[in-house]
């Protein structure tokens, strides 16, 4: 069983080397870049990755293109701000020594936020399917929160995928602005904008769920910030969607 690792990039010089170093357990690395102007391409070449250039359409489409460009049917997809933990690397090496029992595998994702690893708040274990046979699975999602749809069976691995999220609060605000715009476009395209009552009630419920029911309070001040930003995310995406729909 050979594994092709795939990543999509745009100006990822800050994160890319860490991600690529963790992928030495794979048999090749394919990067689809959508026009980086920093040192992304140079870092990729230094680590032996094959770089393809393609205009960005959406996340799912870009990742499916990368998967089809891979030399092997088994594909491991990670983002540039992620890395395989040593435990997950070892599991993959062991998995490669025998025929796979499943058509895809999920593993938990552990996020580092503002300098701290988050253990609760709905952020962990946050299990994701990222290793799959491209003949039995593909990426779905037109705008945001794309995911792998498996047409066969899925197993589980135990090692963590490490997600290095925001180093500072301003970075989180920038990320939230970008993703709420994409989420709003998805809502507007569906024509199912939430009513005013839902917009007013959804943010406080989101905060309560993250901070109380998902035990965000155990993550201390970081958990409070995560819950507050999750509530603001819900408010912002619906507000943007209503503005988009009213301007048509």
Image (tube, rainbow, N blue to C red):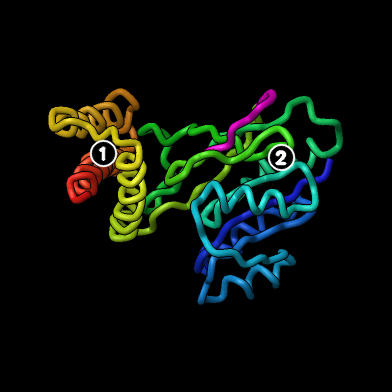
Q: In front of the other: label 2 or label 1? A: 2
217 up-or-down from 115: above or below:
above
197 up-or-down from 131: above or below:
above
135 up-or-down from 246: above or below:
above
Say which residue label 2 marks. 134
Left or right of 136: which side holds 114?
Answer: left
Left or right of 232: which side holds 132?
Answer: right
Q: Quadrant of residue 117?
A: top left
Q: Secondary structure at mark 2?
A: loop
Q: Which residues are magenta?
A: 147-155
**Looking at the figure, which quarter contains the N terminus?**
top right
Main SS, magenta region, reads strand
Across and down, in percent, residue 105 comes to: 66, 32
Kindly identify the residue that appears in the image at 59 percent across and 32 percent down.
Answer: 149
Foreground residue among 236 and 61: 61
Tell me if mark 2 has few (under 14), some (14-19) or many (20+) residues whose alpha carbon lies within 10 angstroms of its own.
many
Across and down, in percent, residue 220 comes to: 29, 39
Kindly identify the residue that appears in the image at 49 percent across and 32 percent down.
Answer: 125
């Amino acid at each position: 069983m050979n594994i092709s690792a795939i990543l999509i990039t745009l100006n990822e010089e800050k994160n890319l080397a860490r991600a690529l170093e963790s992928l030495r357990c794979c048999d090749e690395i394919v990067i689809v870049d959508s026009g980086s102007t920093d040192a992304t391409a140079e870092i990729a070449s230094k680590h032996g990755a094959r770089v393809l250039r393609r205009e960005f359409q959406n996340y799912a489409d870009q990742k499916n293109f990368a998967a089809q460009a891979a030399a092997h049917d088994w594909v491991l997809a990670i983002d540039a701000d992620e890395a395989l933990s040593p435990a997950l690397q070892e599991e993959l090496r062991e998995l490669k020594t025998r025929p796979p029992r499943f058509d895809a595998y999920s593993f938990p994702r552990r996020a580092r936020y503002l300098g701290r690893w988050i253990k609760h708040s709905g952020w962990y274990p946050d299990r994701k399917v990222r290793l799959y046979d491209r003949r039995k699975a593909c990426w779905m999602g037109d705008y945001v929160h794309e995911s792998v749809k498996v047409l066969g069976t899925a197993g589980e691995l135990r090692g963590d995928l490490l997600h290095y999220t925001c180093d500072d609060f301003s970075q989180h605000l920038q990320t939230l602005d970008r993703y709420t715009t994409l989420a709003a476009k998805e809502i507007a395209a569906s024509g199912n904008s939430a009513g005013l009552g839902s917009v007013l009630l959804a943010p406080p419920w989101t905060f309560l769920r993250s901070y109380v029911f998902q035990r965000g309070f155990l993550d201390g001040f970081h958990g409070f910030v995560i819950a507050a930003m999750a509530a603001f995310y819900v408010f912002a995406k619906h507000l943007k969607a209503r503005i988009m729909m009213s301007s048509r």
